[in-house]
Image (cartoon, rainbow, N blue to C red):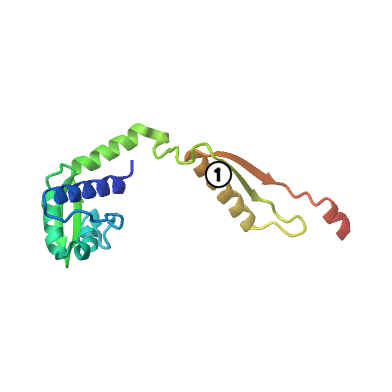
Amino acid sequence: MNLFTDIRALVIENLTVMQAEGVLPEGLDFANVTVEPPRDAAHGDMATNAAMVLAKPAKMKPRDIAEALAAKLIADPRIELAEVAGPGFLNLRLAVDLWRGIVGATLAAGGDFGRSDMGRGRKINVEFVSANPTGPLHVGHTRGAVFGDALASLLDFSGHVVTREYVINDGGSQIDTLA
């Protein structure tokens, strides 16, 4: 579940309805429409640039597009407030029930919350640490071990088949050469 992706889909769905109703012209490209956190949290939970991006190709004022889109979005139970700001940005506040549902789903998923199959079983080899045996160990080696293991765990959690390689440099011929 990605809330920003879901709300972006809702915005595009409503823009498509606006095209069918003749509010917006046909043939607009929605690829550059984004839904993201607003710069200031006081402005809401999310903001969309839809009106600003579509104004020029639609040959309309961005504020007019934003007001029409706000009227559509507020009808959805997930949206508590849709407010036009500035020249045509649209700030959205999500409904409390939506947040409750997300918290409930998170708790129900437990340790599997966020797990995905994005990696689709692709194999990845993560090699980490490999401290130089001819120099002193330092905190950077520990950082490399922690980072490498964390990265491997994240890749595993996202559906990759991960092989962890912790290389032990025992010195061998290097130490013999120095001796």
User: In the displayed structure, does residue 128 sit left or right of residue 36?
Assistant: right
Of residue 140 and residue 76, the one placed in the foreground of this image is: 76
Circle 1 SS class:
helix
User: Which quadrant is home to the N terminus?
Assistant: top left
Q: Is residue 117 above or below residue 21?
A: above
- For this orientation, the residue located farthest to the bottom is 87
Q: Nearer the viewer, residue 153 or 51?
A: 51
Farthest residue in the top direction?
108
Relative horizontal placement of residue 164, taking residue 32 as reference (left or right): right
Place residue 164 in its image quadrant.
Answer: top right
Q: Position of residue 48 (x, y in %)?
A: 24, 57
Residue beneath the point at 18% across and 61% down: 58
Classify mark 1: residues with Cα within 10 Å, few (<14), some (14-19) or many (20+): many
Residue 16 can be seen, yes or no:
yes
> Which residue is under mark 1?
152
Q: Position of residue 15 (x, y in %)?
A: 19, 51
**Number of residue marks:** 1
Q: Amino acid type of disc 1?
A: Ala
The structure residue drawn at horizontal position 49% and vertical position 38%, both measured from the top left corner, is: 120
Task: Tell me if residue 80 comes above or below residue 32 in the rendering.
Answer: above
> What x and y, as percent, mark residue 104?
28, 35
* Residue 76 picture quarter: top left
Residue 73 in view: no
Task: Please provide percent x and percent y for residue 127.
Answer: 64, 48
What residue lies at 74% left-to-right and 60% top-to-bottom? Answer: 135
